[in-house]
Image (cartoon, rainbow, N blue to C red):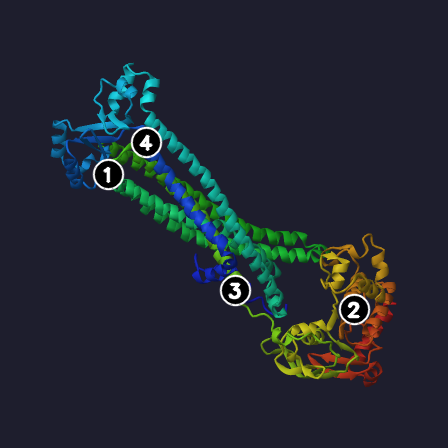
């Protein structure tokens, strides 16, 4: 690499657990799908409501219809009833009247609102009846209960002592069937509540389905857009960016980091909001049912809060370390798999295995530490749940005996308390999802904030024109790192259609000149003109559409041979493909393959020879018909027959276009119009082959050295 591995190569988590600025950037991707998010949020509210409704229905069934927990007071006049009701306005009364008799029914546990003398007065006058149950005012029911004191409340209902009615059943005076007929009103109400309970469960299923589908639909589309934008942004980054950043980490940005955001939107954040709604709702419902019992039950919450805060703090530290280690594993995997041939050729399998094992062990140790933290947190939260239930049994049981709360309230409290700790357990999981997402968001937008290449799009609005191919460098200086100049005061001219070779020792600046012509790196001083115009006046698309490069190490994409020739240019027809393939002497080889031009190409063209890859690259260049052709020549490891085909194709490619060859074997460039000799970033000689030999300078020394080596090899 030309640069040190600095910059965008850290996987430290610097973001907060929740970063509003980062979240706003993410929300931008959800905006086009906001209707689905809104529907999902509405479903979330309905889910929270159903979660709170089920214990309340259970409480209603127990208090109102399963166990009698109501008391009744009789009055002789409506005015007396009204005055009593106004006097004790905090009590939830139900009013009835029949045959000039007036009644108030209220929950038994609310008897505590009345002073003791008031209760004694009512009992002494036989006006207070405790533990009554409602029955239908039917002749059959009244006949069966003729021995009991029945209060006719209305034409529809009557009240009778629940305890006395059960005694009749116990003594055998009433059969089980008769008791059920008498209590048909309560039984029907219980059945109705059962149907409502079941209906809520069915509705809850529908709400869950819609909520999950809608948020995932929006999330998948948003992540599709984000992934597309990240890839598009990466593809526009200058080459200096890739010099600094390992490919494994860049791949992680587009895959793993985007995946964590998807998980946050579809499973983490929405569920987190739901859990908070449910927790808040449970607290409110418990306070409504019995604020005293609720406050006693909540005594475990400070301990739970302390445990959760401690867990969050330690989890964040360990999670940061786990993410760093997994990033190291990804980078090591990408590097070692890419260089597997070198590893095998130099028999480094054991060494690399040991290196990877060391990194893997570090990741394993941190993962075990994270697992231990979870293994401690979850059981202790479950233990706190049991402590809460114990407090509820101890204090709530006494409140039932003291007639302060009803059995239904107690049952609802147990249900709510059990439900209360479920979100706390799940919050620990959602916390990690949110933490991973915020860390991923930070890294993704850190990447997105990095400045891409200047494509000068405003200059590309007009149709890209075909260059003539004239190139001029004027006093150009290039440094990849600060003032460490690779090219120093470079000046030369290449005429349209001229064939020029670049010669020099390794590191002399040959490839850097090609990079500058293609606009791959910015230069510090001087200028470059193309067809007499400053290079900066052209868009990068225009420049690169007019330059065809065949590199020393030809890169082929996974796909087919046809795909690698046209590179997704649908304007190139099959006839054109065959024509260019025949022209560069590769058609015969392709036609011999089982699937011909649709023959699959493995990664980097690993199943093809070097010569075959180079001929396909020639066909790729010719298919785009560039004005400037660049060849990083390297044919020393190609058989003679293939080299003849390549040399013939090369001559055809250089016809009627400006050609620049980076020469490795000087014997292959004797036919070019001009040779530019570079040494330590400067041009030291220029001329054709014969002129340079006569000068007996650096080119002469290089040529003589290569000539002597070739004689020894023969």
Position of residue 89 relative to residue 464, above or below, is above
Seen at 13% across and 34% down, the residue is 118
Q: Residues within 10 Å of mark 2 (few under 14, many from 20)?
A: many
N-term mark: 2 or 3: 3
The image quadrant that residue 692 belongs to is bottom right
Q: Disc 2 and disc 3: Cα gap in Å?
A: 39 Å
Task: Out of 512 and 562, give the one closest to the viewer.
Answer: 562
Where does label 4 land, which residue? Answer: 62
Residue 622: mark: 2
As helix, strand or loop, the secondary structure at mark 3 comes to: helix
The image quadrant that residue 485 belongs to is bottom right
N-term mark: 1 or 2: 1
Where does label 1 land, which residue? Answer: 92
Percent position (x, y) of residue 150? Answer: 22, 23
Q: Disc 1 and disc 2: Cα gap in Å?
A: 91 Å
N-term mark: 4 or 1: 4
Task: Out of 502 and 75, give the one closest to the viewer.
Answer: 75
Q: In this rendering, which labeled residue sits more in front, label 3 or label 4?
A: 4
Seen at 37% across and 46% down, the residue is 279
Percent position (x, y) of residue 689? Answer: 83, 80
Q: In this rendering, which labeled residue sits more in front, label 2 or label 3?
A: 2
Q: Residues within 10 Å of mark 3 (few under 14, many from 20)?
A: few
The image quadrant that residue 62 belongs to is top left
Q: Disc 3 and disc 4: Cα gap in Å?
A: 58 Å
Q: In this rendering, which labeled residue sits more in front, label 4 or label 1?
A: 1
Q: In this rendering, which labeled residue sits more in front, label 4 or label 2?
A: 4
Position of residue 322 relative to residue 465, above or below, is above
Position of residue 319 relative to residue 96, above or below, is below
Horizontally, is 46 left or right of 79 in the view?
Answer: right
Where does label 3 land, which residue? Answer: 446
């Amino acid at each position: 690499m030309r640069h040190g591995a600095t910059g965008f190569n850290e996987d430290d988590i610097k973001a907060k657990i929740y970063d509003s600025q980062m979240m706003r950037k993410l929300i931008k991707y959800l905006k086009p799908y906001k209707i689905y998010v809104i529907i999902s949020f509405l479903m979330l509210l309905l889910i929270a409501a159903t979660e709170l409704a089920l214990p309340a229905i259970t409480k209603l069934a127990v208090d109102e219809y399963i166990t009698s927990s109501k008391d009744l007071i009789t009055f002789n006049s409506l005015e007396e009833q009204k005055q009593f009701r106004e006097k004790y306005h905090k009590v939830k009364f139900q009013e009835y009247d029949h045959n000039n008799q007036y009644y108030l029914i209220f929950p038994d546990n609310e008897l505590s609102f009345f002073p003791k003398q008031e209760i004694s007065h009512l009992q002494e006058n036989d006006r207070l009846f405790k533990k009554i149950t409602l029955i239908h005012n039917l002749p059959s029911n009244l006949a069966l209960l003729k021995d009991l004191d029945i209060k006719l409340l209305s034409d529809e209902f009557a009240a009778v002592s629940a305890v006395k009615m059960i005694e009749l059943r116990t003594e055998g005076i009433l059969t089980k069937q008769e008791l059920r007929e008498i209590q048909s009103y309560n039984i029907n109400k219980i059945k109705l509540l059962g149907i409502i309970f079941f209906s809520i469960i069915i509705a809850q299923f529908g709400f869950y389905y819609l909520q999950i589908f809608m948020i995932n639909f929006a999330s998948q589309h948003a992540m599709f857009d984000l992934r597309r934008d990240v890839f598009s942004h990466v593809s526009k980054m200058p080459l200096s960016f890739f010099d600094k950043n390992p490919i494994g980490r860049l791949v992680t940005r587009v895959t793993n980091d985007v995946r964590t955001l998807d998980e946050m939107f579809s499973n983490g954040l929405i569920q987190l909001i739901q859990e908070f709604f449910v927790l808040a709702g449970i607290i409110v419902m418990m306070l409504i049912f019995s604020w005293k019992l609720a406050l006693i039950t909540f005594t475990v919450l400070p301990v739970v809060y302390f445990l959760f805060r401690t867990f969050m703090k330690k989890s964040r530290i360990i999670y940061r370390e786990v993410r760093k280690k997994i990033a190291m594993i990804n980078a090591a995997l990408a590097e070692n798999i890419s260089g597997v041939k070198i590893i095998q050729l130099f028999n480094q399998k054991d060494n690399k295995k040991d290196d990877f094992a060391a990194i893997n062990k570090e990741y394993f140790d941190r993962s075990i530490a994270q697992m231990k933290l979870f293994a401690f947190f979850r059981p202790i939260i479950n233990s706190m749940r049991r402590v809460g239930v114990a407090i509820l049994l101890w204090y709530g049981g006494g409140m039932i005996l003291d007639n302060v709360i009803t059995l239904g309230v107690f049952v609802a409290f147990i249900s709510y308390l059990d439900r209360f700790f479920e979100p706390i357990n799940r919050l620990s999981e959602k916390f990690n999802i949110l933490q991973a997402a915020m860390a991923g968001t930070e890294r993704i937008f850190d990447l997105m904030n990095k400045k891409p290449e200047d494509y000068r799009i405003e200059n590309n609005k007009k149709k890209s024109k075909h260059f003539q191919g004239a190139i001029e460098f004027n006093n150009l200086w290039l440094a990849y790192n600060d003032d460490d100049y690779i090219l120093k005061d470079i000046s030369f001219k290449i005429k349209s259609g001229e064939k020029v070779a670049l010669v020099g020792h390794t590191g002399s600046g040959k490839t850097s000149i090609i990079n500058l012509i293609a606009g791959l790196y910015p230069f510090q001083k001087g200028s470059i003109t193309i067809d007499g115009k400053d290079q900066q006046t052209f868009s990068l698309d225009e420049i690169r559409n007019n330059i065809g490069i065949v590199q020393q190490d030809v890169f082929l994409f996974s796909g087919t041979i046809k795909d690698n020739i046209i590179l997704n240019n649908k304007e190139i027809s099959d006839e054109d493909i065959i024509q260019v393939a025949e022209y560069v002497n590769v058609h015969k080889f392709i036609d011999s393959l089982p699937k011909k031009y649709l023959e699959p190409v493995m990664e980097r063209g690993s199943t093809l020879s070097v010569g075959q890859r180079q001929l396909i690259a020639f066909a790729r260049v010719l298919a785009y018909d560039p004005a400037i052709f660049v060849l990083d020549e390297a044919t020393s490891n190609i058989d003679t027959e293939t080299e003849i085909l390549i040399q013939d194709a090369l001559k055809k490619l250089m016809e009627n276009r400006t050609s620049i060859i980076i020469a490795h074997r000087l014997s292959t460039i004797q036919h070019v119009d001009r040779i530019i000799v570079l040494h330590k970033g400067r041009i030291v000689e220029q001329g054709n082959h014969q002129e340079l030999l006569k000068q007996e300078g650096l080119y002469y020394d290089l040529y003589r050295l290569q000539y002597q080596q070739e004689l020894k090899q023969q």
